[in-house]
Amino acid sequence: MRYPQDMAESIASRCSMIGKNACLAFTYMWCVHLDCENGEAIKIVSDNMRRGNIEEDCTVKAEPFLQALTGKKYIVEKKKIKSLDELKNIERCAVLFSIDGIGGHWVGVEFGKVAFNSKLHSDNLANGKPISARILKVA
């Protein structure tokens, strides 16, 4: 055994950050049809934080993260939006909902409708507006 308490504190800190800020990572997993149990999804995010594909604050480096998930290279198109109607022809993408235009919560949108939310409830989703989309294309 080598410093188990330090390791436990590190894991607890990382899990807390994942719980608060990993909505884009989980949404990208949904976008590429990666369907796994909650514990496995958390492990995937944590492992990718260790590898540097996700920052310690859960900022996702999209291309390396998506390649780690699927083995494929992706291009991520960033698009400002005002309505989900703008995404009616997109099978799956990530959309940021925000109340104040700063920060927010990422959800999965399929053909213009919210189809995936990594949280049971989000004030940003319930009371905010869609402001940005991330559309994934295999390179």
Image (spheres, helix red, strand yellow):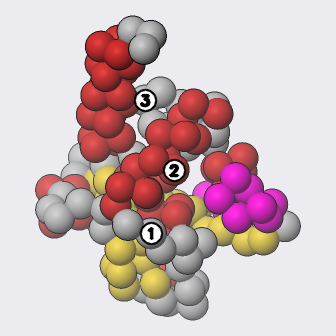
CA distance for labels 1 and 3: 23 Å
Q: Is residue 42 toward the left or the right of residue 119 in the image? A: right
**SS assignment at label 1:** loop
Q: Which is more foreground, mark 1 or mark 3? A: 1
Residue flagged by tag 1: what amino acid is it? Cys
Residue 93 visible to the viewer: no
Residue flagged by tag 3: what amino acid is it? Asp
CA distance for labels 2 and 1: 10 Å
- Tell me which label, 2 or 1, sits earlier in the chain: 1
CA distance for labels 2 and 3: 15 Å
Q: Give the range drawn in magenta.
A: 67-78
Residue flagged by tag 2: what amino acid is it? Ile
**SS assignment at label 2:** helix
Residue receiving disc 2: 44
User: Which residue does the image show at 55% across and 40% down from the upper left?
Assistant: 47
**Residue 87's disc number:** none
User: Which residue does the image show at 63% across and 31% down from the upper left?
Assistant: 52
Residue receiving disc 3: 57
